[in-house]
């Protein structure tokens, strides 16, 4: 019976693949992993205030859109990440406790719309840790959802547009 079930499962899977289809015809696991790496650079660059790392996740004319705020292009996007670093330095200069941001995605899903175009949907949570040791305070800065439009440009998956919403 187990053998019959395995043969049946293999036949169903084989029937779902169009005749002549090849792995290079569409997105692969490597594409999915590359998108994850791009999104990792986005979060790490922003949280660390590393403008170059942050911008490396974006297409040259990429757009960050949140409500009425929009930033487009590497210069504007780098300025966003630099703003995080500047704020941290200003707090230190004012004698305030250090503040570290943590951007996190959850319920993440990648939907391919061709071999070089994809959408990433996720809920996000941004936390801030202020202070150190026993004096640490953790607060929720923002929570909502994102839709990232990504394109494979010159062999690299990059964010073309990130739309941030406070709604699910």
Image (tube, rainbow, N blue to C red):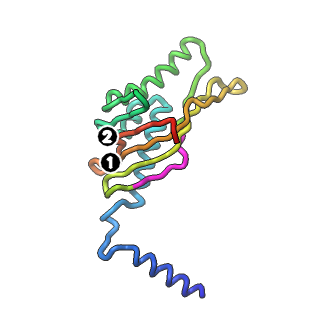
How far apart are labels 2 and 1 at the CA level? Answer: 8 Å
- Image-based side of 78 in relation to 127, left or right: left
Q: Position of residue 55 (x, y in %)?
A: 37, 35
Residue at x 55% of width, y 32% of height: 142
- Closer to the camera, 110 or 91? 110
Q: Which residue is depicted at the point 62% across and 19% down?
A: 97
> Which residues make up the magenta segment?
104-111
Q: Quadrant of residue 11?
A: bottom left
Q: Which residue is mark 1?
A: 151
Magenta region's main secondary structure?
strand
Q: Is residue 106 magenta?
A: yes
The residue depicted at 32 percent of the width and 28 percent of the height is: 75
| Residue identified by numbered label 2 | 59
> Does dot 1 land on a helix, a strand or a loop?
strand
Which x, y percent locates residue 145? Answer: 50, 41
Q: Specify the quadrant of the image occupied by residue 81.
A: top left
Question: Which numbered dot is residue 4?
Answer: none
Check disc 2: other Cα within 10 Å, few if <14, some if 14-19, many if 20+: many
Quarter of the figure with the N terminus: bottom right
Where is residue 76? Give x, y as percent: 34, 27
């Amino acid at each position: 019976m187990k053998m019959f079930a395995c043969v049946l499962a293999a036949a169903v899977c084989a029937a779902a693949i169009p005749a002549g289809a090849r792995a290079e015809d569409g997105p692969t696991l490597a594409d999915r992993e590359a998108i994850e790496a791009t999104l990792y650079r986005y979060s790490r660059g922003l949280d660390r205030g590393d403008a170059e790392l942050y911008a490396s996740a974006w297409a040259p004319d990429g757009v960050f859109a949140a409500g009425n705020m929009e930033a487009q292009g590497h210069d504007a996007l780098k300025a966003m990440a630099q703003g995080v670093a500047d704020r941290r330095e200003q707090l230190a200069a004012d004698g305030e406790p250090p503040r570290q941001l943590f951007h996190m995605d959850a319920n993440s899903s990648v939907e391919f719309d061709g071999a070089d175009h994809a959408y990433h949907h996720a809920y996000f949570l941004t936390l801030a840790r202020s202070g150190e040791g026993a004096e640490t305070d953790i607060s929720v800065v923002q929570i909502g959802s994102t839709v990232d439009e990504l394109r494979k440009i010159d062999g690299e998956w990059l964010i073309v547009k990130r739309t941030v919403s406070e709604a699910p």
